[in-house]
Amino acid sequence: MIRAGFGGRSAGGSPVGVLQRSRQVFRFLNWTLQIDLEPDRPPRMHRYRCLGESEDGTPCGAEGPESGDFATAQKWVAHHLRSEQDHRSYEHVTCTPWVVVPAEEP
């Protein structure tokens, strides 16, 4: 492994950015990316974003509030549709907690 700084001099006047060699031992492991199912995980979050356009062709892009409850997030769509009846396309944005797990503990 090679460590490098950004050049210049340190407060003590010694050069900074000189390459230094450092030896490290790493163990290669197989990792699996999976949905976090632990009880203390953060909640899955839901949000809807309007994909409709204004009369001049500019995208609306309005977003509802983020919610851990799917039905609550969906209510924003009906609320937005009441004020913008031509906006009928939406995107469901979901944030799901994931973790990486080694095949065996190091």
Image: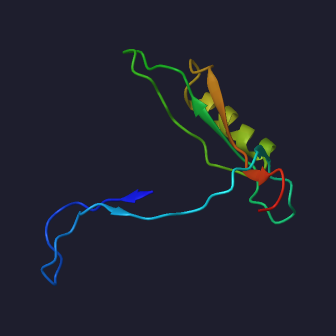
Q: Nearer the viewer, residue 31 or 74?
A: 31
Residue for point 78% across, 53% down: 102
Q: How many marks do you count on the picture?
A: 0
Comparing 36 with 54, the one in front is 36
Q: How is the image coloured?
A: rainbow
Quadrant location of the C terminus? bottom right
Residue at figure coordinates x 23%, y 60% from the top left: 6
Nearest the eye: 6 or 69: 6
- In this rendered view, identify the residue nearer to me: 14 or 57: 14
The x, y position of residue 98, in whole percent, is 74, 49
Name which residue lies at 54% across and 63% down: 24
Q: Quadrant of the rendered structure where residue 64 is?
A: top right
- The answer to which quarter of the image holds residue 48 is top right
Give x and y (percent) for residue 100. 74, 51
Residue occupying the point 47% across, 19% down: 53
Relative horizontal placement of residue 55, taking residue 105 as reference (left or right): left
Quadrant housing residue 74: top right
Where is 14 relative to 84, above or below?
below
Left or right of 102 on screen, residue 84: left
Residue 2: image location, x then y, percent: 39, 57
Q: Is residue 35 above or below residue 13?
A: above
Question: Going by the image, does 25 lie left or right of 11?
Answer: right
- Residue 70: where, in percent of width, then height? 78, 43
Residue closest to the far bottom: 12
Picture quarter with the N terminus = bottom left
